[in-house]
Amino acid sequence: MEMNKKKQKNFVNKDPEITNLASGMEVQGVAKYYGDGPLRRTVIEDCSFTLERGKVTVMIGPSGGGKSTLVRLLAGFEKPSAGHILIDDREVQRAGPDRLVVFQETALYPWMSTEENVLFGPKAQGVAAGTARARVDELLRRVGLAGFRDKYPAQLSGGMKRRAELARALANDPAVMILDEPFRGLDAMTRSLMVEYYAELIEETRTTHLFVTTDVDEAIVLADRILVMSHRPMRLISDIPVDLPRPRHLLDVIANNKASDIKRRVIELIHLEVMRSFGGRTSGMKSTG
Ligand SMILES: Nc1ncnc2c1ncn2[C@@H]1O[C@H](COP(=O)(O)OP(=O)(O)OP(=O)(O)O)[C@@H](O)[C@H]1O
Ligand SMILES: [Mg+2]
């Protein structure tokens, strides 16, 4: 695999529309197996796609399909069994501050206040105290938690915790932001508020995003592209561009014809996969043993 060492330092992007230090990622023929011999279990099979720099790619697929497994590979927590994962033409070797992952489960430090949690990343990266504090102030204001900066995670509601987590991730200015079902478990009202809120943030930050979800409306509001994934072993079954104007709102997805067409396409594809997974049928699944 040819590595482009020069690109390592070349994070600063000159595109005025993309304000962050966005990077692109490539997933090339990636597979992931667990176990050996007859016990071998294929979770991901021959997966290839690009996360375009400064764009929002949304991955949608049935529960248990392998999305979080792929997230762990992209983050560098685990290695693919086959294929390559590149960030700006360099092979991902391990976890790094250039790729920030917000997982399904909450990860705020319970012993730190909201403000301390958000400050944690910039402090660890050695950002000057004044600069870090200004950034954290701005982020807390943006996520509507300026009045809760001194509260501990246990004193925040579920939605507030998720907002604090987003602020904490954004405070690191990641080159790629990976969000694995960040709004899972929130009630429908809070969830729709969070989606709209996140869509606004995307407008402002324009970093490279991979957003994993099982919710089609959420996908359409946020995505530049939707990757529809199969059930396990997970493959890419469709790559659908979402060229709807921004800013977008959840109501657009209901009212807009083009959005409805995309929604129907995605639901049809996912429905087939969910039927397969529930029926335990073997179509789309291959024996690997
Ligand atoms: N370390 C492991 N060893 C064996 N199997 C594993 C391991 N990690 C994940 N799997 C299997 O991979 C499959 C996919 O799991 P994964 O968590 O990636 O799915 P998901 O698409 O994120 O699901 P959900 O939408 O419910 O979060 C599961 O069947 C799981 O049992
Ligand atoms: Mg998952």
Image (cartoon, rainbow, N blue to C red):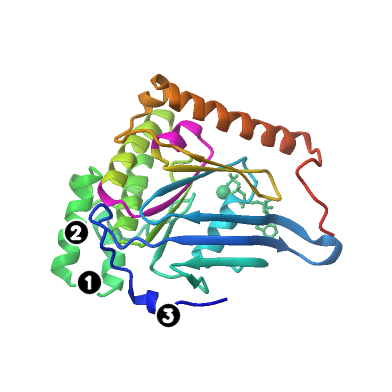
Please report the residue visible at 17 percent of the width from the left and 70 percent of the height from the top: 129
Asked if the residue under mark 2 is in contact with the one under mark 1, i.e. CB atoms within 8 Å, the reply is yes
Q: Position of residue 262 (x, y in %)?
A: 50, 30
Give the quadrant of the C terminus: bottom right
Asked if the residue under mark 1 is in contact with the one under mark 3, i.e. CB atoms within 8 Å, the reply is no
- Is 7 or 203 nearer to us in this picture? 7
Please report the residue visible at 34 percent of the width from the left and 76 percent of the height from the top: 9
Q: What secondary structure is found at the residue carrying circle 1? A: loop
Marks 3 and 2, how far apart at CA: 31 Å
**Which numbered marker is on residue 227?**
none
- Is 188 or 82 nearer to us in this picture? 82
Q: Is residue 149 visible?
A: no
Give the quadrant of the N terminus: bottom right
**Which numbered marker is on residue 5?**
3
Q: Which residue in the structure is indicated by mark 2?
A: 135
Magenta residue check for 208: yes
Please report the residue visible at 55 percent of the width from the left and 26 percent of the height from the top: 264
Q: Which residue in the structure is indicated by mark 1?
A: 127
